[in-house]
Image (tube, helix red, strand yellow):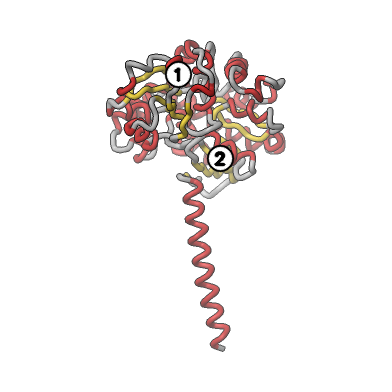
Amino acid sequence: MRKPVRLTALAAVGLLALSSLTACADDASTTAAAQGGGKGEKVKIMVGGLDKVIYLPAMLTQRLGYFDAEGLDVELLSEPAGVQAETALVSGQVQGAVGFYDHTLDLQTKHKDVESVVQFSRAPGEVEVVSTQHADDITSPKDFKGRKVGITGLGSSTDFLTKYLAVKNGVKVSDFSPVAVGAGPTFVSALQKGSIDAGMTTDPTVATILDKKIGKVLIDMRTPEGSQEALGGPYPSSSLYMQTDWVNGHKDTVQKLVNAFVKTLKWMSTHSAAQIAAKMPADYSQGDKTLYAESIKATLPMFTDDGVMPADGPATVERVLKAFNTNIKNATIDLKKTYTTEFAEKAAG
């Protein structure tokens, strides 16, 4: 009888070890996860940085209880860059991704049909900052030549926009060095240590940089006006995008998701930055609630209040991408396949 008991014990130990390894792997891959209530239809959404203000509607919708109200059990996962959220989506790890709309155009050139189903914003929400050490010699993107310019990740929307700003100002993509430094503490550290001379990031990282006086704003695209000045039009950025086949096969679920997000966008339009900040997880403020609320206030103008794609937004995005992206420049993009207003219009109505 002893032999079976020993084998059972070993099996139990092995199972425990395997469970521990799996848990560690899950922690490493998700970075942060927000579990739903455990009831309703399960949906996984990968966010290109849950604590970024530009993607605030994702966590806020969870915190307001709007997913639950729609009968959904939504799990929010986080990766530091939008391009990683895109990868998780196309590989089938998740059903949706919260990231920049411009990925849908890029993916179409790679024969991946992906569409934005609800548009959170009408401006990038991005800010090009320059270290205080180089504030006098980097006064516009024309000075990127020979510089190390920070981005969240290669192939990310910060990468796309940085390249556009350079090309627009007469600097070739090959004339400067894009450096992937993520966001938050890693971006701040890179700027402090001189690993980058300038870089593109969002709030609350921008607010931290200004508060620490380690950098200055070079280009501000947190408002429609800033987007117009830098990019020549509205630049729809943060959105929920999904694979078109999945959308077509799960329209009821997609409608519930969009209903929840549109409720959040409307709620945001009638509440102050401080009220919004109070609803978010405590650790998002990184110990400074006032600074966090200020970072939300600076970014709020970028958001839509109805989730509908701005009419001339997709054309602006295509024009920007064609300026430097060889794949898109030489491709015929069917913009109508990169987004839909069907669900947002129904939710808003």
Report the residue at 52% width, 72% height from top. Answer: 12
Q: Nearer the viewer, mark 2 or mark 1?
A: 1
- Position of residue 288 relative to residue 8, above or below, is above
Report the residue at 69% width, 20% height from top. Answer: 330
Report the residue at 64% width, 25% height from top. Answer: 105
- Position of residue 214 relative to residue 81, above or below, is above
Q: Nearer the viewer, residue 175 or 316?
A: 175
The answer to whether residue 305 shows anywhere in this view is no
Q: Nearer the viewer, residue 14 or 340?
A: 14
- 66 left or right, relative to 271: right
Q: Nearer the viewer, residue 55 or 127?
A: 127
The residue positioned farthest toward the bottom in the image shown: 1
Name the amino acid, label 2: Ile
Q: What residue would you read off at disc 2? A: 45
| Percent x, y of residue 254 | 63, 35
Q: Residue 341 falls in which quadrant of the image?
A: top right
Give the crowd class for mark 2: few <14, some 14-19, many >=20 residues within 10 Å.
Answer: many
| Percent x, y of residue 299 | 41, 23
- Quarter that holds the N terminus: bottom right
Local secondary structure at mark 2: strand
| Percent x, y of residue 122 | 52, 19
Q: What residue would you read off at disc 1? A: 221
Q: Residue 272 falls in which quadrant of the image?
A: top left
